[in-house]
Image (tube, coloured by chain):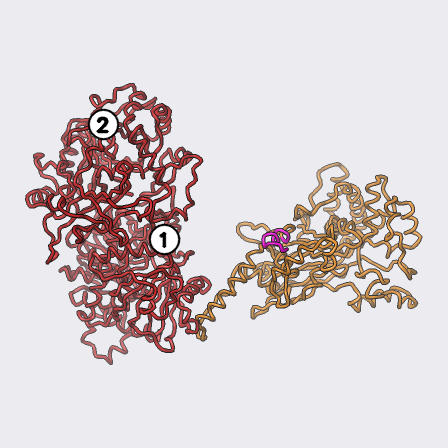
Amino acid sequence: FYLTPPQVNSILKANEYSFKVPEFDGKNVSSVLGFDSNQLPANAPIEDRRSAATCLQTRGMLLGVFDGHAGCACAQAVSERLFYYIAVSLLPHETLLEIENAVENGRALLPILQWHKHPNDYFSKEASKLYFNSLRTYWQELIDLNSGETTDVREALINAFKRLDNDISLEAQVGDPNSFLNYLVLRVAFSGATACVAHVDGVDLHIANTGDSRAMLGVQEEDGSWSAVNLSYDHNAQNEHEVERVKMEHPKSEEKSLVKQDRLLGLLMPFRAFGDVKFKWSIELQKRVIESGPDQLNDNEYTKFIPPNYYTPPYLTAEPEVIHHKLRPQDKFLVLATDGLWETMHRQDVARIVGEYLTGVHHQQPIAVGGYKVTLGQMHGLLTERRARISSVFEDQNAATHLIRHAVGNNEFGTVDHERLSKMLSLPEELARMYRDDITIIVVQFNSHVIGAY
Amino acid sequence: AAGMFLRLLSDIQWRAAHPKWRRMTSSQRSTSTTAEPHPVSLPAQAQVVICGGGIMGTSVAYHLSKMGWKDVVLLEQGRLAAGTTRFCAGIVSTARPVSIDLKMAHYSNKLYLQLEQETGVPTGYMKTGSISLAQTQDRLISLKRIASSLNVMGIPCEIISPKKVVQLHPLINIHDLVGAMYVPEDALVSSANVSLALATAASRNGVQIHERTSVSHVTVQKGRVTGVETDRGRIQCEYFVNCAGQWAYELGHSGEEPVHIPLHACEHFYLLTHPLEKPLSSSLPTVFDPDGRIYIRNWQGGILSGGFEKNPKPLFTEGRNQLEIQNLQEDWDHFGPLLSALLRRMPGLETLQIMQLVNCPESFTPDMRCIMGESPTARGYFVLAGMNSAGISYGGGAGKYLAEWMVNGYPSENVWPLDLKRFGTLQSSRTFLRHRVMEVMPLMCDLKVPRWDFQTGRQLRTSPLYDRLDAQGARWMEKHGFERVKYFVPPGKDLLDLDHSKTFYKPDWFDIVGSEVKCCKEAVCVIDMSSFTKFEISSTGDQALESLQYLFSNDLDVPVGHVVHTGMLNEKGGYENDCSIARLSKRSFFMISPTDQQVHCWAWLKKRLPDDSNLIMEDVTWKYTALNLIGPRAVDVLSELSYAPMTAEHFPSLFCKEMSVGYANGIRVMSITHTGEPGFVLYIPIEYALHVYNEVMNMGQKYGIRNAGYYALRSLRIEKFFAFWGQDLDAFTTPMECGREFQVKLEKGMQFLGQEALLEQKQNGVYKRFTMFILEDHDTDMDLWPWWGEPIFRNGRYVGKTTSSAYSYTLERHVCLGFVHHFDEKTGEELVVTTDFINQGEYEIDIAGQRFQAKAKLYPFSSLFTQRRRKDEVELSGYQRE
């Protein structure tokens, strides 16, 4: 039994989303042309999340992918909340005051973010009040702290990440009288999520990364070929600096037990994450919260389980590593993706596939015979191949979809094999996770003309 | 080798252009390419100025000078033969479905054959023959139809089997072929050299040729060409000939009085290869593979192959820009499908090395036929352009016809299908042209079955009832931009979709049209005929009557309210137009002509009506919607709607009266139907159209009224032996030749145009006779249907061609109309055709090579008429063309 090509397409395209930055007077003045995003579930329900929004009170655009573990609650919360924390961190003092005054007097709030959401990207209505109150407390503190200095993007990103993780932790400790919300905040805190967020403002690109999702820049070399530049470091056991950092933060006696089987405390793959209070709270706090919590929490073996060799928490942080990059005209696109993609594809292949897709859609380099010796048969073969390539590109209107098609369907020769694609996509739910992870991809396309003019 | 070829070419160009080249020594010649560009200044005046030094311009110059017009100046903006002419493939092919195209190509071939001998300029003429391949049975049918018409023209041609194809051209893969057509006398030429040879001959005859001279615009005063402005000064002239190829449109629009020349350029690609290991013979036939959309000719031991792709690339829509012909890019991806077709046809060429992909723009016209003739608005402004990629094939013939037109007032053949005046301003929108040529270019190779129609550029002119009729199942065709109903598909009845209904056999609308015809015969039908051209001519005194009496052959001095069918004849008595004229009052006339007469008839009358401000002619085509009520119950419907008696005593045949219909007043009702059936045509001011239509349909219900279309009309008129202008009648046909002497009043007491010629014919007899043929042994269900252009054989000898045909639901037979000639058996000389000659023959009609017995008749079946009428009352006219 095989899926037909249209069936395959409908699965691959179910979650695809595209956004084009609107033009003014026929000109796009933003350094971002737009973005394509998509996700393919392996878990049911999917534990990955994605977010994209334009900052309305400051300049710039925010894009992020979030890889949840131990459920999707934390990834969901972070995908809803993190950009607000970043936007607020970036706001100048006067704007914060204006917003606070508006809330105080029940006036309409200045919009902070314009979201670019796929219909499947939902926000939880029930928690919005709770989340809002936490956010408001944050900006009130920012107002009180008024340093008078202009906000640095790096600092804002780090503060926002840390503050949100702190709020997640606090909300779980305090609890909520509403039993649904009470259970929700606990699930958020006891599950975890990595985050890889890009902030683009003109030629300034900041990547804030927590965990093992990855940001990669697609660069077109002078000869037209494509190369990849990493704009984030994976926070996992493969990263020596990260292992070093963890070891530095704990007594020498724990050195052996800190990283086992390439996992933090032998359990957790990412070395940085949101939520995951089991790796942050003291044993006493964990026990107290669980005992006073709802029955569902008590029945869950995972939450009750205390990691072995748990002596000097916290072992985990949500603090991101921030990399700043000045965009150049040859920087054509940025790929943000969860580890589901990077497990299956090398970044160099990702750069090539996306690069050829993005340029191929617009113009394929014309062939000229010139002085070369070409036979009719050779030319015919060449043209047939080019037509086939175009048709596979034209099947996808979305660079992220195109990348997923390759990630899932590529055979050993690096070309999409329909049979393989069909097999991978028709795996039953319980098997899917064994062959592939959730994949979430955002491909941001840059406007070289604008970047070149800076 | 290509470089060499081009260098050679520019050398010859220069020599031809240089007035003293014959005296130059060869050593001077080789260095002369750097000589000053303008050795001779322009003359201040000339009789004729030709713009364009391609094949068309040089051919016109050649023929004009041969006919004795020597005060001719040819201007070329760049170098002679440097545009499309230089780049084109140089194939001379006579296999053309349209008769006038075929004649042009045939003449060109004969001209080029002896051109080298005549001029001393090598033309590269090589008689190779051509093979047209058929991959399907339908394609073979269309080739057989062409073969029939080539054969009767005396052009050798045969339908051959795939096996024979391989004998003629060993490289061809024949596995997917069902047959082919072989035309052994088709040829190859070096097109640029042909053009240079024509220029050389013209220049010897006194034509002045100036290169690097651009025409900026043409000046026109009082509707006449007075001169040409160039970048090197002004030339006064009486005649201007626009042979500017793909720039003809723009040049036409550059003057104050625009001349609309509807053509548009498309990129056209062909491939040149290096020679084969064993170089191809230069006498190898040219191959046309229309199903693969390609042509293949031998070229310097290798091949030259191009085609007409499905997705053409139009260019220069916004006019001329920096993109010049020389700079156009090769586009291999675009050429890919054609390359596949080439390798499928000749798999042995896989290893052949590519030399170049040439991008050579060609200009195309809205109806795939070239554009020739005089501007309807500027006298002396002639045009020859828009060759639809067959410039070399047509060049000689087209130049000859245009030269004849200028010198004699009209060419020696009927060129109405090519006449510039078949178009109006409505076809000159850039958007329309761009869209239409994108359909036309692929059509070059598409199979064309009877009654195919263009799909682009539609819904331009419509009747106010368009939406109403469309909602009732109308299927549409287009004429002169106007949407007209073919037939109505009854609700719940599915016709085949477009692709499947393309057939040379019995069409899927057969029963539908049959029931419409039946309704016309037994009850009443409504046909919207609003597309007809309508003029009103009036004057303060008798000027209108006097002028029209001179311009029309019938007597128009009839009582007010009478309708007269009459020809608008030329000096030779031929039909320039065939119309109905109603005398609205003593001094005003209402004239109804065929749809595509709008430009031609207007120009013809404008040119000949006296310049008198008290004589007014107005085009009122857009003011009236015309509903044709056909059938025995039309009388009842109309009298109930108007409370006026409509019977023959009160409203005789060929009568016109303004009356009220329903609430609407001022409806011009005429007792004609253009079919010979009883009924009326209602000319309704457009604001009343919907009201009158609704009233007619409501009232008609009890009489069984229904909508009908032009296919029903055609069936009715052809079984009644009605000739239609543009289809059966043309400028070379006189009323005497089609049994319409009764529409000519030789003794109406005053001179009229064509009178002398008709008098002579009356005395000496006619040389062709319009005849009706009933197919005897033709099986409507199984046999190929006749269309038009089928050869007619009398006692086994070719005597003429059909001009139209239809299935008669009354006779249950096919009826073909056509002209019978009498060629002397030995000399081929045309002899007088007598009634006895017609009646005493055994006839056959050749449909795609198969002959069917036919009965010839000179008069319609009187039994078809339910009511007997006086002979001169019988309506014998009509206009619509299919």
Disc with the residue nearer the chain's start (2 vs 1)? 1
Q: Quadrant of residue B212?
A: bottom left
| Residue B403 visible to the viewer | yes
Instruction: Read off the chain for label 1.
Output: B
| Residue furthest to the left | B763
Quarter in which the C terminus of chain A is drawn: bottom right
Q: Residues within 10 Å of mark 1 (few under 14, many from 20)?
A: many
Quarter in which the N terminus of chain A is drawn: bottom right
Whether residue B710 sits left or right of residue A224 in the image: it is: left
Q: Mark 1 = which residue?
A: B440
Q: Amino acid at mark 2?
A: Cys
Residue B381 in picture, x, y percent from top left = 23, 52
Q: Mark 2 = which residue?
A: B656
Instruction: Read off the chain for label 2.
Output: B
| Residue A92 visible to the viewer | no
Q: Is residue A136 magenta?
A: no
In the figure, the shade used to draw chain B is: red
Residue B438 in picture, x, y percent from top left = 39, 53
Q: Which chain is orange?
A: A
Residue extent of the magenta highlight: A1-12
Residue A117 in picture, x, y percent from top left = 66, 48
Camera-side residue of A172 and B235: A172
Q: Amino acid at mark 1?
A: Val
